[in-house]
């Protein structure tokens, strides 16, 4: 996440100028400080989280259950030879895999389960670890700033919990009972679902996070997919991209892994530093190994080893109530790999060579595929959905081979369509890079201010959930609905439409009013620009 502060600076300068002219800046400052103090005291007295909003409840037909699973990778896999400077410890040795599962449960059992166990906190303990990682990311980590960040995180989000029932039973209903059906245009694109479709059991999604992120950062998005009948595994990567994570193994002391970059590692003989490209390559290989390890664990659960995995789970043996009953209930033949930013780069990479035993991915969802995480894999052989946030499409960036990042992404999706794999590429209007994370839900004002997102934060996330849900429905049964059925009207990202000054067919035109009367999806043009769709071009 790289918030742009240009806008901020400009606005601040302007408002400062105005304020100085009127001569009330000192008074204004005093008022702001006073308000902040009053607000802090209010939050303290009424045990309200300071500034951060609680995470909203999930909205799908199912209630949402969650389990943290950490499982040993045995034998450990050595992904790259690099070692940490100073300690000589191997930097890329995969010993355990850690992920949060979000899954469908029933509303009554979820209530019962949440009475028995505490909810997961959004920032896992100890907070100081996360704080130290953020301070490192900002290149200001020292004793004082670490303490300061810990205090700030505690005050801001320390009280936030994830509204999912820990270790509640997996729902018995195979399909959502009250799945809302969205009506849409009759037109159907000439596409068929892939031949080797789902075999039965809940569809499984493995999700890989972006830089300076952790497994809880997309909890609402993941929970919304779970509430719609999917099992979602949110990985926490130990490749140096998590702010702070603990590697826990049975009968071994805890080890912490803080955020690290290329400057922290060297070759085993202490002679060479790694290049930036080598470092990214090592990180992406590590992520791929973690993705494979998660697949392995989910297959083991499906094969009946749920109780063994729970009994080894250092996270309070979570899963001991529900995992033993998951045998044969997961569709582990056809999983979907998904990711955001660096994670989207990783998800694309995991498709290389097509589905295998270790990577049984029959589809992928890439949200804001990375601009600085190395070249994007073009060897895609399964259906693909690429969603860009507004800021990701609008900010032009030159990518590998001197091509624009947007064009590279578009080329991958178009090529994949030509090979007969239905694929979509679209931009979500009004959103910014972190819009799909929990951050805007927790701090809407702060996020809009620093990243320029203009869309209502709940609406932004809802749009992401709907489009991914429609893609997953297409994968499950071949139903082409919602945005999946729309044609690509915008071969290039079009700024004009965002401002409501577009050509006919874009958002903000006069005809919109009539269209709005035609159901929920008729006004999709307010939220989306479709760049590539198998429904063919206009
Ligand atoms: C490891 O860390 C976790 C989380 O802070 C803690 O609950 C657990 O007790 C620790 N285990 C050991 C062996 O120190």
Image (tube, rainbow, N blue to C red):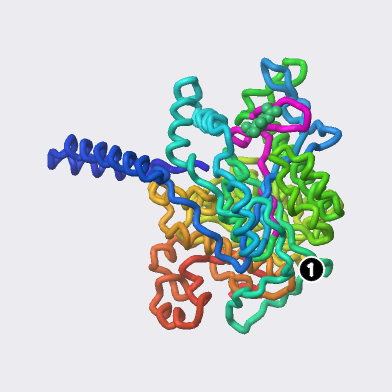
Is residue 345 something one can see in this rendering?
A: no
The x and y percentages for residue 484 are 63, 71
The x and y percentages for residue 121 are 56, 43
Position of the C terminus, as image quadrant, is bottom right
Disc 1 element: loop
| 247 within the magenta span | yes
The vertical placement of 253 against 113, above or below, is above
Outermost residue toward the left in this view? 22
Residue 487 vs residue 518, the one in the foreground:
518
Is residue 248 something one can see in this rendering?
A: yes
Residue 33 horizontal side relative to residue 327, left or right: left
**Which residue carries the number 1 mark?**
194
Magenta part of the protein: which range? Answer: 231-257
Residue shown at 43% from the left, 83% from the top: 514
The vertical placement of 488 against 380, above or below, is below
The x and y percentages for residue 454 are 41, 57
Residue 248 horizontal side relative to residue 222, left or right: right
């Amino acid at each position: 996440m790289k918030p742009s502060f240009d806008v901020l600076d400009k606005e601040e300068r302007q408002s400062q100028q105005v304020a100085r002219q009127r001569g009330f800046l000192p008074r204004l400052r005093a008022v702001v400080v006073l308000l902040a103090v009053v607000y802090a005291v209010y939050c303290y007295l009424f045990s309200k989280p300071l500034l951060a909003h609680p995470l909203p409840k999930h909205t799908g037909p199912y209630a949402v259950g969650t389990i943290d699973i950490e499982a040993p990778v045995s034998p450990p896999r050595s992904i790259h030879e690099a070692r940490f400077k100073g300690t000589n410890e191997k930097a890329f040795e995969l010993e355990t895999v850690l992920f949060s599962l979000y899954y469908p449960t029933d509303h009554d059992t979820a209530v019962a389960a949440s009475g028995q166990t505490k909810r997961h906190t959004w920032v896992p303990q100890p907070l100081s670890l996360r704080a130290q990682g953020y301070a490192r990311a900002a290149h200001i980590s020292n004793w004082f700033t670490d303490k300061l960040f810990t205090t700030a995180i505690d005050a801001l989000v320390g009280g936030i919990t994830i509204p999912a029932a820990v270790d509640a039973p997996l729902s018995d209903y195979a399909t959502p009972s009250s799945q809302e059906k969205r009506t849409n245009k009759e037109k159907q694109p000439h596409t068929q679902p892939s031949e080797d479709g789902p075999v039965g059991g809940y569809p499984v999604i493995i999700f890989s996070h972006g830089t300076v992120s952790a497994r809880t950062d997309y909890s609402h998005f993941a929970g919304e997919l779970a509430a719609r009948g999917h099992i979602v595994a949110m990985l926490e990567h130990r490749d140096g991209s998590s702010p702070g994570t603990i590697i826990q193994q049975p009968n071994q002391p805890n080890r912490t892994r803080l955020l690290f970059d290329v400057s922290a590692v060297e070759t085993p003989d202490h002679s060479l530093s790694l290049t930036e490209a080598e470092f990214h390559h090592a990180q992406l290989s590590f992520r791929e190994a973690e993705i494979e390890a998660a697949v392995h664990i989910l297959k083991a659960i499906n094969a009946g080893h749920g109780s063994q995995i729970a009994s080894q789970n250092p996270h309070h043996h979570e899963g001991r109530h529900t995992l033993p009953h998951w045998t044969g209930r997961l569709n582990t033949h056809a999983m979907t790999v998904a990711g955001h930013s660096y994670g989207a780069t990783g998800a694309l990479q995991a498709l290389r060579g097509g589905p295998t035993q270790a990577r049984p991915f029959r589809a992928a969802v890439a949200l804001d595929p990375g601009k600085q995480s190395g070249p994007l894999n073009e060897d895609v052989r399964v259906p693909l959905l690429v969603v860009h946030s507004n800021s990701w499409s609008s900010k032009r960036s030159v990518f590998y081979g001197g091509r624009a990042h947007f064009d590279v992404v578009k080329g991958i999706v178009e090529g994949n369509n030509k090979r007969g794999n239905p694929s979509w590429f679209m931009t979500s209007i009004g959103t910014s890079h972190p819009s799909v994370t929990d951050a805007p839900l927790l701090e809407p004002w702060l996020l809009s201010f620093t990243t320029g997102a203009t869309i209502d934060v709940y609406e932004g996330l809802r749009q992401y959930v709907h489009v991914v849900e429609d893609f997953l429905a297409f994968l499950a049964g071949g139903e082409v609905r919602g945005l999946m059925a729309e044609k690509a009207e915008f071969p290039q990202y079009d700024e004009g439409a965002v401002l409501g000054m577009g050509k006919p067919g874009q958002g903000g035109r006069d005809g919109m009013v009539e269209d709005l009367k035609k159901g929920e999806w008729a006004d999709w043009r307010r939220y989306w620009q479709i760049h590539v769709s198998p429904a063919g071009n206009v």
